[in-house]
Amino acid sequence: MLRYKADVIVIGAGISGVTAAIELLERGRSVLLLDRDVEQNMGALAKESFGGIWFAGTPLQKRYGIRDGVEQGLRDWHAFAEFGPDDHWPRAWAEAYVQRANAEIFDWLRAIGVQFMPMPLWVERGLHTPGNSVPRWHIVWGTGHELAVVTNRHLLSRPNRDKLELRFGHRVESLITTNGRVTGCRGGLEGSTQEFEAHAESVIIASGGINGDIERVKSHWHADWGRPPETILNGSHKYADGRLHDAASALGANITHLDWQWNYAAGVHHWQPRKPAHGLSLVPPKSALWLNWRGERIGPMPLVTGYDTHDLVAQICRQERAYSWQLLNKRIALKELAISGGEFNPAFREKKRLAVARDMLRGNHWLYEQVTQNCPDFVVAETLPDLVDRMNGLVGDGSVSLDAVADAAARYDALIDLGPRFHNDDQLRRIEFARRWMGDRLRTCKSQKILDPQAGPLVAIREFIISRKSMGGLQTDLSSRVLDGGGQPIPGLYAAGESAGFGGGGMNGKRGLEGTFLGGCLLGGRIAGREA
């Protein structure tokens, strides 16, 4: 039995665990940081992300004449969250985030060397329910990879670095209590029969959510989405399996809102998978037509990304088969297609300004070649009949109707031909409105027809629901203390980040405004470290 001892144990070396450890070291505490993964993956899912963080009322917004602040941000948050009357702690954490994020995340990150792209982006604008009323998604220059690199470096360069013990490949299975207080944990080493035991005054759980376990995702499927699809791809961390939720629950911890999940509607298979059902989350092109499994345009209100991700998932799941197609052409793909995360955004990740500018002006040819040549869910053809043949070859049952696909494309293109004054189509209206904001105009086509012979070849993408983040979890108070079923703190036990539903067991409510996930990890980690 391996044995360790420290003042505080932090379980999970993702972004929330790292920030908690920074705060602990700054207060002179000795820290044991345990993680199940290998050392090069320190930073966890944040390191793979695109690196967007939600703020309201920053200097970057003011630079572009965006009037925003706490009151407006909180109003939008409450509208999107749809909190219930019993959601005291989720609501309290939402208010704390909006009020404290600028000082405790934005200013703090810039002070330790993180830079942001000059223009915030406008996502989750809201559809049936109001969302972000102004652009608030602030992108880290260098993506989430840079965010993890800088925060990891900040931790490892602390003057009292000798008080930090890092142990990777350590899988925590249970928590230890002494006289009613959580005082440690037990587990084993990955790929080994070796066991370990660690003791401390307090324990912080920062091990992620449940969305890496697809069966758990399905068992906690939100009622808005009906039945879960047969195929759900995994876009979460491979070790986000809820193991620490179970360990805390065994001690009476209250776990809330596991059906509040942030899943995406446009997942495709990774052609070099690093985990079972490994998926990539596309940023779906606004100018593509979103079709059902038969090739019929989904409606009557067409699906367009950037407004309400929760509703996109709901619309796909209401189809007879819960997957979809997007129909587009090469010109649309070059300008609008993107994959979430740092892996397929090398120009952003490596901070190559000229390459970023080139891709925006000339199209992202590198990404287009990658996905069309390697991803099994992409099909390309010069003619529509050939494209539909290849779509049917992919699904193997002839379910895609050429007549349906041709009708959807012809009707849409005919509306474009009438001219902007007569664009009586909600997708065209939303594209026109989105292009009023420079951040969207740079990467959104203007009234691009699908069957334009100058814009080919044609492209079809088969898309699945992809699991991503848990927005519910261990219920915590504003000191990040884990609460029991009676609302009382469990002595010695704290939780931060996705383990806590990013705070309070669900601070986002049933929808997220995007960027509140990384932000919630950073704020929750800092608070947990201070309090522990």
Image: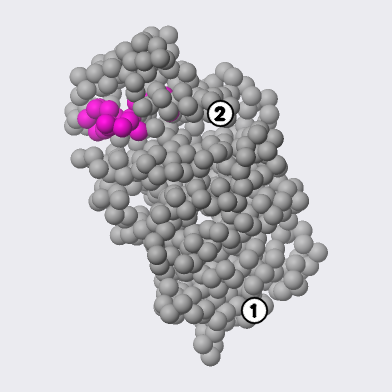
Horizontal arrangement in the rendering, residue 465 relative to residue 177 (left or right): left
SS label for mark 1? strand
Q: Distance between the residues labelled 1 and 2?
A: 53 Å
| Whether residue 414 can be seen here | yes
Task: Please name whichever residue, 529 or 173, is drawn nearer the observer in this view of the structure.
Answer: 529
Q: In the figure, 4 relative to 57: above or below? A: below
In the picture, residue 420 is in which quadrant? top left
Q: Is residue 5 above or below residue 23?
A: below
Can you name the residue that lies furthest to the bottom here? Answer: 179
| Quarter that holds the C terminus | bottom right
Position of the N terminus, as image quadrant, is bottom right
**Could you say where residue 400 lies in the image, as x and y percent from the top left?**
22, 27
The answer to whether marks 1 and 2 mark residues whose Cβ atoms lie closer than 8 Å is no
The structure residue drawn at horizontal position 32% and vertical position 55%, both measured from the top left corner, is 222
Q: Which mark's residue is nearer the viewer, 1 or 2?
A: 2
Disc number for residue 437? 2
x, y percent for residue 500: 50, 64
Q: Give the residue type that dot 1 points to.
A: Lys
| Number of other residues with Cα within 10 Å of mark 1, as a class: few under 14, some 14 to 19, many 20 or more | some
Please give the name of the residue rendered at 27% of the width and 47% of the height, measured from the top-left corner: 229
Report x, y in % for residue 165.
68, 69
Q: Which image quadrant for residue 4?
A: bottom right
Percent across and percent down for residue 208 are 50, 60
Total tally of numbered discs in the picture: 2
Q: Give the range drawn in magenta.
A: 286-303
Q: How is the image coloured?
A: one colour
Q: Where is 98 relative to 321, above or below?
A: below
* Residue corresponding to mark 1: 5
Q: Does the magenta stretch include residue 321?
A: no
- For the residue labelled by badge 2, is the local secondary structure a helix, a strand or a loop? loop
Question: 309 or 379: which is nearer to us?
Answer: 309
Q: Is the magenta stretch mostly helix, strand or loop?
A: loop
